[in-house]
Amino acid sequence: MQSDNTHKLLGIRHLTDSTYVLEIERRGMDFEAGQHILLGDASSLDKREYSIYSGTEDENLEVLIKEIEEGLVSKQLKRLEQGRPVEIEGPVGFFSIEKQDIEAKKKFLFIASGTGIAPFHSMVKSIPDLDYTLLHGVRHAHEAYEMEAYERDRYILCTTADDDGDFKGRVTDYIKQHEFDSDTVCFFCGNFNMIKDAMALMEKKGIPPAQLHAEVYF
Ligand SMILES: Cc1cc2nc3c(=O)[nH]c(=O)nc-3n(C[C@H](O)[C@H](O)[C@H](O)COP(=O)(O)OP(=O)(O)OC[C@H]3O[C@@H](n4cnc5c(N)ncnc54)[C@H](O)[C@@H]3O)c2cc1C
């Protein structure tokens, strides 16, 4: 029997050996850029949270997933064949840009590690004329997932294991070496340690805590 929250898997784009984008039938699901869903193979009871990667006006729903070597759901979803059903709960979450900040044409700083770039991809696709800078921290430059989605001078790739990005070092090293306007609204997404350190640095640089928003993946 097909349950109401079942959506068909339309395709999979492999971006690296471990990272992929699932394209999923949207079925009219409404969401705000920055929100996430609970997603799993319909033949399994297990689900995990995944940020919505696609834009609010896109026909299909997309998520960007990194396969975790010792993980369960990120492996199950990678093996799914086109046409198979997935189960979705949501959307949920409050990691979104406030309307008044968009209208006030505020400056945004997006700070992501790895697949933590997913909600920012959705925000950039969904909200026209956004004044953003996106810091993306990865090990190798080939992990700059679909960077053509961002204006080139707004996307700063920080690589720790090779010299082929825009900046050699962690996103926190980049923050230490740069100044930011005190009215910048900051969004952090990815692993806990990066977020903790980056938020502390931004606070030290004089950004008020009310302008710091975080989504922790693990
Ligand atoms: C709000 C929210 C949004 C999320 N959005 C995304 C997303 O857009 N894309 C995405 O790939 N993941 C995202 N995650 C992480 C995701 O929910 C799963 O935790 C991840 O896919 C691992 O699930 P699993 O079943 O394969 O591994 P599990 O069997 O659940 O866990 C295996 C281990 O892997 C660790 N782990 C989890 N994620 C990572 C990671 N990225 N790198 C290294 N270790 C990790 C866990 O802490 C655990 O110790 C999000 C998490 C949250 C809370």
Image: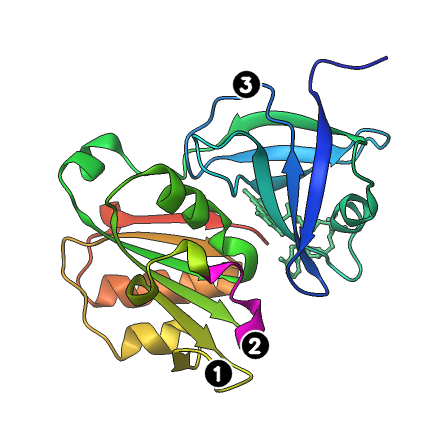
The answer to whether the residue bearing label 2 lies less than 8 angstroms from the nearest atom of ligand 1 is: no
Q: Residue at x 74, y 35 (%)?
A: 40
Q: Position of residue 126 (x, y in %)?
A: 37, 37
- Quickly name the residue at label 2: 140
- Quickly name the residue at label 1: 164
Residue 69, by quadrant, is: bottom right
Is 185 placed above or below 171 here? above
Q: CA distance from mark 3 to mark 2?
A: 37 Å
Q: Is residue 141 magenta?
A: yes
Q: Tell whether label 1 touches label 2 (CB within 8 Å).
A: yes
Q: Quadrant of the C terminus?
A: bottom right
The 10 Å Cα crowd at callout 1, few under 14, some 14 to 19, many 20 or more, is some
Q: Position of residue 80 (x, y in %)?
A: 82, 42
Q: Position of residue 186 (x, y in %)?
A: 29, 53
The 10 Å Cα crowd at callout 3, few under 14, some 14 to 19, many 20 or more, is few
The 10 Å Cα crowd at callout 2, few under 14, some 14 to 19, many 20 or more, is some
Q: Please name the amino acid that badge 2 sits on.
A: His
Q: CA distance from mark 2 to mark 1?
A: 8 Å
Q: Please name the amino acid that badge 1 sits on.
A: Asp
Mark positioned earlier in the residue sequence (2 or 1): 2
- Quickly name the residue at label 3: 28
